[in-house]
Amino acid sequence: MSPKPALRINTTTLWEYPSQHYASASGVTEQGDRDYVGATPSWILWQLLQRYTRPKDLVVDPMCGSGTTIDVARDLGRRALGYDLNPQRSDIFRADARHLPLEPEVADFVFVDPPYSTHVDYSDDPACIGKLSAGGDDNGRAYFDAMERVIAEIDRVLRPDRCMALYVSDSYQKGSGALGRCPRGRLMPIGFELFMRLRRPFVPVDVVTVVRHNRKLEQGNFHKAAEEENFFLRGFNYLFIMRKPPGDRRSQAPRDRVEARGERRGKHGTDRPRDRQGAGKTVRPTSERRKGGKSSTPASREDSGSGQRSGVPRKGPPAATRSDEDRALREFRRRGRNPRRAPKPGKGTPPKKGT
């Protein structure tokens, strides 16, 4: 068996390594279980933890499988917590990735390698996401809904301004086909679908393409079938690296949108029924108040509407509705007056048009 090459931090978005596992400085040549179906290549975890974590950081894997993430984290001096519906070791806790027994914002890095549809039987538990097809009769809705809950849970336990990574592959359902004809199989773009969902709570850091070296790709009969039936074997995985925004920036944006939306609605008083606006009082149209009324001070442009533009709420009853102003406008036009022009201080009412 040839010695494994030394690991160096990759500097491009195309990652490749000739072995599933790497040789650690302590002489350990295997992380996790090489016989575990669907095991994550340990060198991928090495690359991620070297870049996005520091010694003693807490690394969490909500779908830990055979424990590869735990072994790599310990090798690099990081703390680790692994969870799985079907734990393979005593240091992996039994838990559903959608309901982790963790307090909010405790993880410094989260890695997840989810099922790619139903190709691997990970567990007998009916709650296992691996039993949901990404290309079933529901077009994968149940699978992607479940993964959205996993992503939301990762968002909950991850510290602000820290990173997470999701390792996933697309899937393909074979159909009839031959060279020279369009195949009737079905591609399930799991990577694209999950990336769109990751972008809701997280900010993309980068997308890495990881070259696959698995036993299937080494067997000639698989390549022969792919050629004869005109389909492709999956030759790479996606590695989506995302960052959780700082808490103050994330919480401020929705609040700003709500305030702006409320300000727009309040400008003409259309966000509440008219009988609630005056709280039992009669609200005179703005144009009538400007005509003369009890107040001799003209209303300024800033004071019109909701009173929120200047930042100081108006005391007393709210501004009149648009329908009130429209009726007043028609009445003043009938009389030959211009209600949009407020009288100048001390000048009384403006003269009639044409005088």
Image (cartoon, rainbow, N blue to C red):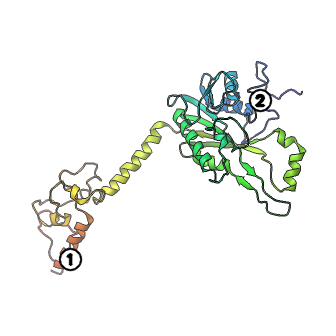
Q: Indicate the position of residue 276 as horizontal and vertical percent values.
A: 22, 55
Q: Earlier in the sequence, mark 1 or mark 2?
A: 2
Residue 343 in sight from this viewpoint: no
- Residue drawn at 78 percent across, 56 percent down: 175
Give above or below for 224 relative to 102. Answer: below
- From the top left corner, tell me how far across and down residue 20 is, in percent: 79, 32
On residue 49, the disc is: none
Q: Residue at x 79, y 45 (%)?
A: 235
Q: Quadrant of the C terminus?
A: bottom left
Task: Name the kind of residue labelled 1 in the image.
Answer: Arg
Looking at the rendering, which quadrant does residue 36 occupy? top right
Q: Residues within 10 Å of mark 1 (few under 14, many from 20)?
A: few
Secondary element under disc 2, as helix, strand or loop, is loop
Question: Percent x, y for residue 5?
Answer: 82, 29
Q: Secondary structure at mark 1?
A: helix
Residue 153 in sight here = yes
Callouts 1 and 2 close, C-beta under 8 Å: no
- Image spot of residue 48 (x, y percent): 67, 33
**Disc 2 target residue:** 7
Mark-to-mark CA distance, 1 and 2: 83 Å
Q: Amino acid at mark 2?
A: Leu
How many residues crowd around disc 2 within 10 Å: few (fewer than 14), some, or many (20 or more)?
few
- Residue plotted at (9% across, 60% down): 294
Specify the farthest residue to the top: 26
Residue occupying image coordinates x 62% and y 24%: 80
Q: Nearer the viewer, residue 253 or 80?
A: 80
Which quarter of the image is occupied by the N terminus? top right
- The quarter of the displayed image where residue 111 is located: top right
In the foreground, 58 or 131? 131
Residue 333's disc number: 1
